[in-house]
Image (cartoon, rainbow, N blue to C red):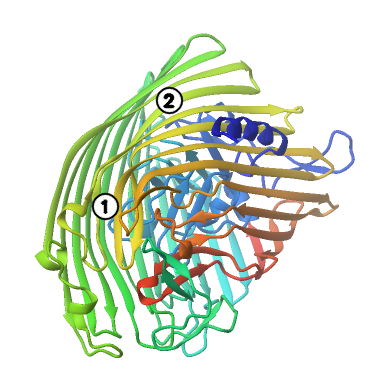
Amino acid sequence: MNRQHKIYSAVALGALMGGGIGIGGLALPAQANEAEDGAGTTLLLEEITVTAQKRSQNLQDVGIAVSAFSGDQLKSLGMVDTADIAAHTPGLLFTQPGGSQLIGLPAIRGVSQNDFAPHQETPNALYVDEAYVSFVAGNSQYMFDVERVEVLKGPQGTLFGRNATGGLIHVISRKPGEELEGYADLTVGSFDQIRLESAIGGALSETTAFRAAGFYNTHDGYVKNSIGRDNYEDDTIAGRLQLQVQPSEDLEILLIGSGNKTDDIVVGGGQFTGAGKDDDGLGITISGQPSLFGYLDTDGDNHKGAYDIDGRMNKESYTLTGKLTYDFGLYTLTAISSYTDFEFDYFEDNDLTPDPISMFSMDQKSEQFSQELRINGAHEKLKWVAGAYYLSIESDNTSSFDLLAFGADQNNVFALSTTSWALFGQVEYDLSSELTVIGGFRWSEEDKDYTFSSACVDNVPTLVPVGCAGAFPALAGTINDIGTFNGKIDKGDWSGKAEIDWRPHEDLLVYASVTRGTKAGGFNAPLDGLLTAEQMAFDSEILTSYEMGIKSTFWDGRARFNAAAFYYDYGNYQSFDMRGFTQVIANSDAEIYGLDAEVVVQPGYGLSLMAGLSLLDATVKDTPLPSGRLTDTEPPQAPSFSANGLIAKDWDMTTGLIRAQFDFSYVGDYQVGVANAEVTAIDSYFLGNARISYVDGEDRFEIALFAKNVFNNDIRVYAYDISNLGFGENVYLPPRWFGGQFIVRF
């Protein structure tokens, strides 16, 4: 079957099967009304307002593939952190290779970059309250007191700009209101989990309102350590304070201060598997092969191990954001300033055995400041936005790979200073009541200064006395040989968009667009220092997207169906692979064909049905393997098929509402590294969750019981090829997790 046939078949399949939870979605908990036939209750389809084009619009009026979730939906679906969003968003895969709250690697429609080095930025941006989050360790964060989440698919370079080649995730917190109100949300769950979320807000005066929110989560480790402390525990506290001042009808000022801290938790917990190398130098699984000291994991439990070193992680972040909005009548001025101070440190027992073979660590201290100015206007048939953007990032980092067995401790120190500015604009013009044309342009300038130093220190070996000369040789021309690399990037590039929207009637939108997105080049940070100076830098990537989509509402408002088919022409794709201890990003050309679709149907009788699918055909061209052979490969985190769904049933009782629901996500086979090593190939998996809840008639309190990973499947989501030491490392999602939740609203 050729690619075009696959896309056409996918459109037909999408129309029959429908698509996801995110589009329009359910109002959960929702108002319960009698169905037209009087035979029960039904959940209302919620009209979600999004800001995908830097102004408020109904989700169904935006010619962009957007999945959106209200805050109530997030709670009912058990979506607590940013990684959870992927389970209900077709085309989005979000992995955490070091477990929850460490590193977040989002992939949207096969666009990703899996380098976990702390100075890197992903091609799928995370925004919180319109402020960009640049740190890969900042992508994984808890969501609390949220108004909504928007996932925009495809290049968003015209209006959002910064590193949104593949798309973006935007988390919008609940804003202060005039009425005094709030809630408290307590969850008690498996592994001695206690999670508490609360908020309160209201008016302080006629012109001033506030909102304060807090979050706390703690649980024991769910990966059992037979000789030490259990791994993958949590101890996170977070808070947010907002102050909104409106001194006049035309002026509004919003100040947001937030912080979160994950304190000294035990991490690591990867699973050991024997591995060797094939003829191309790529890792292959060798079942039953022991470690260098003869350790063999024979318990068959993927949530149990024997780790002689207790890994540790600390993460701390503080952000101040200010937003000023002034309405001049014919146009509106918006200014957004944001500053973030971010720190984290991490180390783990990297050999995954009870023997002192190796240990990995990294840490980061960074500061970020961004400033955006934009002007929005509208006049009869014309709508427009123009603006300027500035970003500054200072990042100081270290990484270390201590081969205890060989007496070699490799240490790296690297710093990156980034300054970027951009000018952007977009216009929309109504040619008629049915046709609208859209055009956008952005020019960005990027200035990066980078320093990377690498050195190895000889220590007392525990197994083989080869030291640095044998473990991390100072090969001629590598950083281990020259000691320090200094690099600089000073380059400008453009993003653009052309789109036409056709709306034959108010319940149907058909759109077609051509969009160009870019992501600036950068620098590698090889853990072993064994790249040459020429290999340290990688160039900017360019993604040109051709997309056609449909958004529709039908059956008297009881159903929505949205779908989009796309082709990506990907130039200089920044492909990532980890070869031994060498992290490397290099440029290759790629292409991606795909389709994603979402539907929600509420037929009455208290039933709500939702489903979603994503189809991908992605190829990276002429990928170099360690043997030197060139071959076409699959990009990381690009499953050819994934799907999600939910069924919910409401019973309208005299005193309130009982709801039972089951949701699932299925992810097909995918790769972790661009070289497609067998040891890092991830098998397909199915994740199911269940929940039953009771909400009183006045929506004042809610009681719920839930189960995550209800079938207790072993779900492997990430892997590392460490076959040069004879093994591979596997990362699994948590096992089945039971819990109870109690919410009080006032």
Q: Residue furthest left?
A: 482
> Disc 1 residue type?
Gln
In this rendering, the answer to whether 519 lies above or below 276 is above
Measured as percent of width and height from the top left, residue 227 is found at 48, 90
Which residue does the image show at 76% across and 27% down from the upper left? 556
Is residue 250 something that shows in the picture? no
Question: Pointer 1: what residue?
Answer: 368
> Based on the displayed image, in which of its 4 quarters is residue 282 positioned?
bottom left
Left or right: where 50 falls relative to 26: left
Q: Residue at x 25, y 49 (%)?
A: 369
User: With respect to residue 394, does 274 lie above or below?
Assistant: below
Quarter assignment of residue 605: top right
Task: Report the Cα–Cα distance between label 1 and label 2.
Answer: 32 Å
Q: Is residue 585 visible?
A: yes
Q: Is residue 234 left or right of residue 564?
A: left
Classify the position of the C terminus by image quarter: bottom right
- Residue type indicated by callout 2: Val
Q: Earlier in the sequence, mark 1 or mark 2?
A: 1
Residue found 49% across the figure and 68% down from its top: 731
Direction from residue 412 to residue 211 in the image, left or right:
right
> What residue lies at 51% left-to-right and 51% top-to-bottom?
93
Judge by depth and name the residue closer to the eye, 332 or 26.
26
Q: Residues within 10 Å of mark 2 (few under 14, many from 20)?
A: some
Horizontal and vertical percent position of residue 526: 25, 63
